[in-house]
Image (cartoon, rainbow, N blue to C red):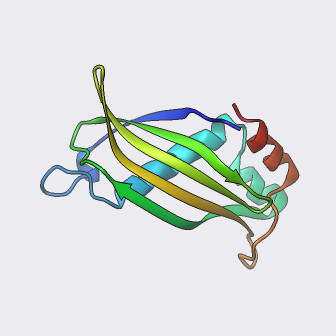
């Protein structure tokens, strides 16, 4: 499994509150985007998974710890690590870091559990075999 996927983003005005600090819930958006890019790199097409298998990923649970604030115009590095892979779920450990030259500062850590459900009734189901294999072999 991929142990060190990193995706870079920039903090925009829309991501911040009136003080120029990233609004706490936006870290979940940042983490979501990084996981999507991780899946894309692993050759997992979520739209195809929905159309071909009638299955999709949904967020089951989140836990985020905040360590320092990100601010307007900061460049952030978001990491994605698969912590646990089950038959119907994936648990990710993610981090957001501010990078400024050679300085790195940990801003937030998140543990996000994603489940696989059918598109008809949102009932839990197995991750399609071909998707599971791509996740296992990513990296």
For the point 72% across and 44% down, which residue is it? Answer: 44
Q: Is residue 63 left or right of residue 90?
A: left
Residue 84: x percent and y percent? 68, 52
Q: Is residue 8 left or right of residue 6?
A: left
The quadrant in which residue 75 appears is: top left
Residue at the far bottom in the pictured view = 121
Residue 70: x percent and y percent? 26, 45
Residue at the far right in the pictured view = 129
Count of numbered badges drawn on the protein: 0
- Quadrant that contains the N terminus: top right
Residue 46: x percent and y percent? 69, 51
Q: Is residue 61 left or right of residue 110?
A: right
Q: Is residue 40 left or right of residue 130?
A: left
- Quadrant that contains the C terminus: top right
For the point 63% across and 61% down, which residue is it? Answer: 114
Q: Is residue 6 above or below residue 18?
A: above
For the point 24% across and 48% down, which residue is it? Answer: 69
Closest to the observer, 4 or 18: 4
Residue at the far top in the pictured view = 102
The quadrant in which residue 51 appears is: bottom right
Residue 59: x percent and y percent? 58, 64
For the point 38% across and 53% down, which residue is it? Answer: 27
């Amino acid at each position: 499994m991929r142990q060190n996927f990193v995706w870079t983003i920039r903090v925009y005005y829309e991501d911040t509150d009136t003080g120029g600090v990233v609004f706490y819930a936006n870290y979940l958006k940042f983490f979501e985007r990084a996981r999507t890019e991780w899946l894309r790199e692993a050759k997992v097409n979520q739209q195809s998974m929905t159309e071909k298998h009638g299955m999709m990923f949904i967020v089951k649970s989140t836990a985020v710890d905040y360590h320092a604030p990100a601010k307007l115009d900061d460049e952030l590095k978001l990491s994605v690590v698969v912590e646990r892979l089950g038959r119907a779920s994936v648990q990710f450990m993610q981090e957001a870091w501010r990078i400024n030259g050679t300085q790195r500062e940990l801003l937030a850590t998140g543990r996000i559990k994603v489940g696989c459900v059918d598109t008809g009734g949102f009932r839990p189901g197995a991750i399609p075999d071909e998707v599971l294999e791509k996740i296992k072999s990513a990296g």
